[in-house]
Image (spheres, rainbow, N blue to C red):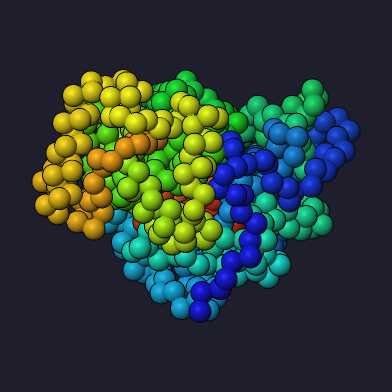
Amino acid sequence: MVEKKDEMRPPLDMEGPPPPPKGIRKVPSAKMPEGGVIEADVVIIGGGGAGIPAAVSAFENGAKSVVMLEKRERAGGNAIMARGIFGCESSVLRNAMVYSDKDEIFTNAMKWHHYSRVNGKLLRAYINQSGDTIEWLIKRGVGFFVDTTTRMNYHQDPTWHCVKNGNMALAMGKLFTEALELGLQFYADTIVTEIIIENGAVAGVKAVHQGQDLTVKAKAVIVSTGGFLANEEKVKQYFPYYSKDRFGGFQAPNMGEGIALAQKAGAALERECTLVREACAASDKAPRILSEFTREPYLLWVNKKGRRFVDETAGAELQICTNALMMQPDMRAYAIFDEGTLHYMMDKGFELSKGDDVRGCAIPTLKGKLEEIEKKAPESLKIADTLEEIAQWIGCLPEDLSDELAKYNSYAQSGYDKDFNKPRRYLAPCHKGPFYAIMHMAIAVDTVGPVRIDHETRVLDDNYNPIPGLYGAGVITAGWQSNDYCGQYLFGSALSYSINSGRIAGRNAAGGLA
């Protein structure tokens, strides 16, 4: 039986991004050493979703002294925002009778990526360890659940393990506390300026801690500084189509400083990175229920010209349907439906929502909620008696929108979508006013890459040789994603990969000290 959830989830009508969750306590930095020089077995640059597990793993595997350097005021990074992580063959899945064979998942993921830009051994190492990492966290008091809210569509197995009564901030908090108890020396407000290389091998790092120079001598350095989404210049370097106006969503404050540090130390950078993105996002000012609504397959999508461009059931594939959206003018789309579809939704509830309170349940207050939202977020939702008003709001020619809806309605009547072969059951007509239109777009979630590593997380140079003592973990590293975030088979892999690669890096960094 799938375990009933009892986790804390923000309500669907909440406006804007959720407040930062708590879970990792703010601690004072370690004392500055005399002369500004300290020795350690392992130095970790970045105290987020990869760095914290790396610290615990390093201690577990024999490191006696570990130093963590974090540029922010506290540890945790973006990991504290996540609900859960991917894992296969875990006890949680076995209890829920969810089939999750690691061999099958790996093979399917490689095919899904078209074998492009993915290091098979690295992806394999991550997937193979993912179930053990769930158990690793369970032993530390982190409870997980899987159920219908942890899958994105009908055919996806729920391998996304979400945290009970909270989110991954709880897990990160437990790991961080354990690392401190094991002897982690943590320095916040610290900017690393150089990875020291002597005779071709790592010898430590140079940093500035609260305005004071700090040198940490060590034979092993793990770079886990996260992505570079906040560095718009670098984002455009890899993704020329990107701009903040075209992509909504929370902007993670990561600048990608670790990339330059690694490159200066001899690391090779891959030519391409991955922009992790999701579709069906309403304006940041709009309540979250609009983003849930736009995924519903009964609606029809048009672009700024008033033309359909995809089978709207693509919304079930939240990551890859961004590819269709990004081909449209200004990368904007509009989900349109009429009063008849609205009443159907009020009676039957949503079909793809991740919230049990609206999925498959009557929502008698839905119309009133939409009317309230239009007043609060008129840029995201338009309610009008005529299609002409909807067209004016979109900015398209009324006759183009009218013609498109007439054609769509003919498909609904015949039960066959000649343009995009939308399944018959979802061909709901749109001809009875008032009409509703929701603007939606893609959001950028994070970046992946470009530091090259091998399956042991050793950073490689241009000749694919490991740089002795240098390791990489988390989304700064490449080789585990192609163009599209692998949501179908590895949903929740961004943080899951960070934690697992951090464990691998910590283990190998400690093992290479002898």
Res 506 visible: no
Residue at (50, 79) in percent of width and height? 1
Residue at (36, 69) in percent of width and height? 103
Rendered position, 455 above or below 484 = below
Rendered position, 503 above or below 237 = below
Which quadrant holds residue 121?
bottom left
Which quadrant holds residue 200?
top right
- Residue 178 position within the rendered picture, expressed as x and y whole percent measured from the top left: 76, 58
- How many numbered tags mark residues here? 0
Q: Residue 60 versus residue 3: which sits nearer the camera?
A: 3
Q: Residue 420 versus residue 448: which sits nearer the camera?
A: 420
- Residue 26 position within the rendered picture, expressed as x and y whole percent measured from the top left: 80, 43
432 sits left or right of 506 in the view: left
Q: Residue 179 versus residue 280: which sits nearer the camera?
A: 280
- Residue 386 position within the rendered picture, expressed as x and y whole percent measured from the top left: 30, 29
Residue at (77, 38) in percent of width and height? 187
77 sits left or right of 387 in the view: right
Of the 4 image quadrants, the one containing the C terminus is: bottom right
Residue at (69, 46) in percent of width and height? 21
- Residue 450 position within the rendered picture, expressed as x and y whole percent measured from the top left: 44, 37
Res 427 visible: yes
